[in-house]
Image (cartoon, helix red, strand yellow):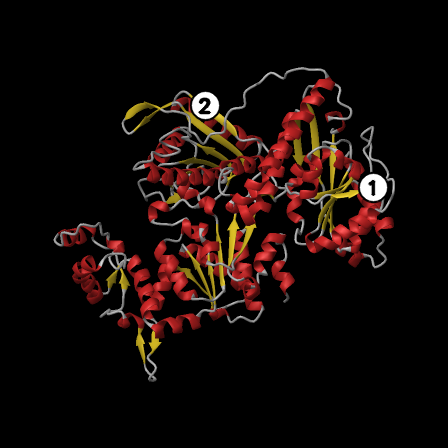
Amino acid sequence: MDAEEILKGLNSDQRAAVLHDHEKNAQLLILAGAGSGKTSVLTKRIQYRILCGVEPEKILALTFTAKAAAEMRERVQKLFPNAGVRLCTFHSLALYMLKCKIPNGAGGEYPAYELLGFKKIPSPTESSEREFSQALSKLKLKVKVSRENLFSDCYGAAVSAKLQPLREAVLESGQVVFEDLIYSAIQLLETNEAARNYFREQWKEILVDEYQDINPSQYRLVKGLLGDRKQLFVVGDDDQAIYGFRGADIGNIERFCEDFKESTQIRLEWNYRSVPNVLYLANDIFKNKPIHLRKMLRAGNLNGSGGNPLYKENRKPEIWVSDNPVEEVQKIILSIKEMRVGYDLAWKNFAILVRYNRQRLYYEQALRDYNIPVAGDVVETASESGSEKESASPEVTVEDGVHVETVHASKGLQYAVVYYAGLCEKLTPGECTGDRKARKKQLDEERRLYYVGVTRAEACLFLLYCKRRFWKGKLRRFRRSRFLPRESKNVPVVKMPVVLFKVYVAVTVLAYMLMYILLLPFIKLRYGRNFDAWLERKIQDFSKFCMRRLRVDLTIEDQAQLGKVDWSRPVFVVGNHNSFADIPIVFLAIQKTVGFVAKKSLSRIPFLNFWMHKIGCVLVNREKGGAAKAVRKAIAERGKSVRIFIFPEGTRSKTGALGVFKSGVFRFACENDAILLPLVIKGSGPVWERRKDSGRCKVDVKVLAPIDVVECRKENEKFDPKVNLLPMVHRLMESEL
């Protein structure tokens, strides 16, 4: 077995994560967007490290549920049967640590729990809140103490002294709650040098799943085990931090780069679950968050789950407004029945998501009233004897039924069709209480919860707003949720002569460029080392601005092909050329900023010259020649990070037909063992050069499958870019026009 077998099927970002070198690049934070394959990255990382010679017993991987740990263990052991990796929850790890025997330096050893004063082996049990509250009330404390935080060291000396009898009772009986285990393990690491050395020696590498959900005590446990070492590999998504009410601290992810100064950060942004239009909505939810944590989800699965035709339609999320719950339910029922038959979907492919449990009960009963099976219901089957009197009918749990879930319960799940109900104020988002700071914190979590709900949808998403409904015993009127996208108003298109329209577009676009040139010094000061990330986002915003001003309706097909590109290698993008508008169109199609090869005369356009240099364009003088030399110089300067867009026709087509290709870009691709990414643009000619009026234009872009010239060379030792690659790409692009 070699590393390539483990890395097979991973995109370039996932691959970089699995191959991460802690010694060179220190601790690693992976910001894993929804549906981006984080579990695969974690398990393949473990497999890769075992392949590299790390003893499986020296690897510790922490998850939040026993189910997740079991799933990861099963995946790891497919390649390495019986590998002794410790895959467990935080609480089971803490219990294991307390039961370990610690060497005392004199040839003997003590159970770790005895070092903390336990008289019996700790055993997790259900605590009696009533008994604890009664015992606590007798102490007459002025601070709030919960049973979960009994062993916390956050209290002052006076409070700790009063709590000591309660703590002693737990140490005497060994009857602990789960949080007692965490605090005890922390105390063991922070106060006992022998235990600290023992456990740090036991685990050389630490991996943590769902890092956004760890609480302060779990963070201290990880830090205590890690010490000042670099071997920390964590995966999380701050956009899915929805357990603040359980004590989870999103700040652990936000402060990671401060806590570990030399650390590295990798984003997993290719989503293999949802269609592009669902992801466009998801990306807009956090468009105002800090730039260094922002992610742009991109569709990475061409066929969706199972390849049903529904996924190919790439439907836009719909907003349904109903006056009352009866009208709303009837819409849902009719839609489920139509789509189930029309697309041959099973009942289990549908889900209704809600914020609160009492909403869930309502929709479950509504489905039953219409004789639609509900997943999880227990029903009786017909008796085999045919007589109900002879024997009781056996009961079964419905599996193929419509799922009705709270958004919290749906995390980690996915459905072809999602009806997200209750999109109104005080339901989604839920009611926020407390002072201004507390309300903001709650609202931020509500926004993340909304994001989780949206990203459960694979192919079809319906956002439901009901104006009136019964809630807490009363018929109430609800305002539309602030999270719902604003409905686009049918603004009448102002007609104007083509010349005047072009002047209007040119002035507004140049003004946009000028504005950010003037703001640039302040932007650099604000974003610092995150300036490149800001620029990447701003180019996308600028491209969208251009499409609005040019009145272009842009459709992008097969964007998921981009997920096959290894962006850690040189990438050359090629496309047909019809218009000046092709540049912003290309930026939106590949969702990345690339420098493009352009004629030097474009640098005379005010403000454009500044931005062309800023994004790494290569300017060439076609009259004097030397274009190849200029491109090779740019490639040499950028190395493996080179990303260049070249129009192989060399000039714009006046008819829209594909012209003759020049061989330059194909030679560059072969010289640099690059990836060649072709795309085809249809309908951009009338956007500017052949514009006939000021009405709307339709432009289609199709991303074709990337071509790896290294693989081409393996298949044909005499592979020649001009003879083999150029005509192949020309045929592929021409067939799509």
Q: Which residue is mark 1?
A: 621
* Quarter of the picture holding the N terminus: bottom right
Instruction: Say what amino acid the circle numbered 2 marks.
Output: Val
Relative image position of residue 50 (x, y in whole percent): 55, 68
Q: Residue at x 78, y 37 (%)?
A: 576
Of circles 2 and 1, the one toward us is: 1
Relative image position of residue 345 (x, y in whole percent): 54, 36
Q: Nearer the viewer, residue 517 or 417?
A: 517
* Quarter of the picture holding the C terminus: top right
Q: Earlier in the sequence, mark 2 or mark 1?
A: 2
Q: Is residue 628 left or right of residue 240?
A: right
Q: Is residue 395 left or right of residue 654?
A: left
Q: Secondary structure at mark 2?
A: strand
Q: Residue at x 57, y 57 (%)?
A: 17
What is the quadrant of residue 609 in the picture?
top right
What is the quadrant of residue 603 in the picture?
top right
Q: CA distance from mark 2 to mark 1?
A: 57 Å
Q: Which residue is mark 2?
A: 321
Q: Residue at x 34, y 49 (%)?
A: 247
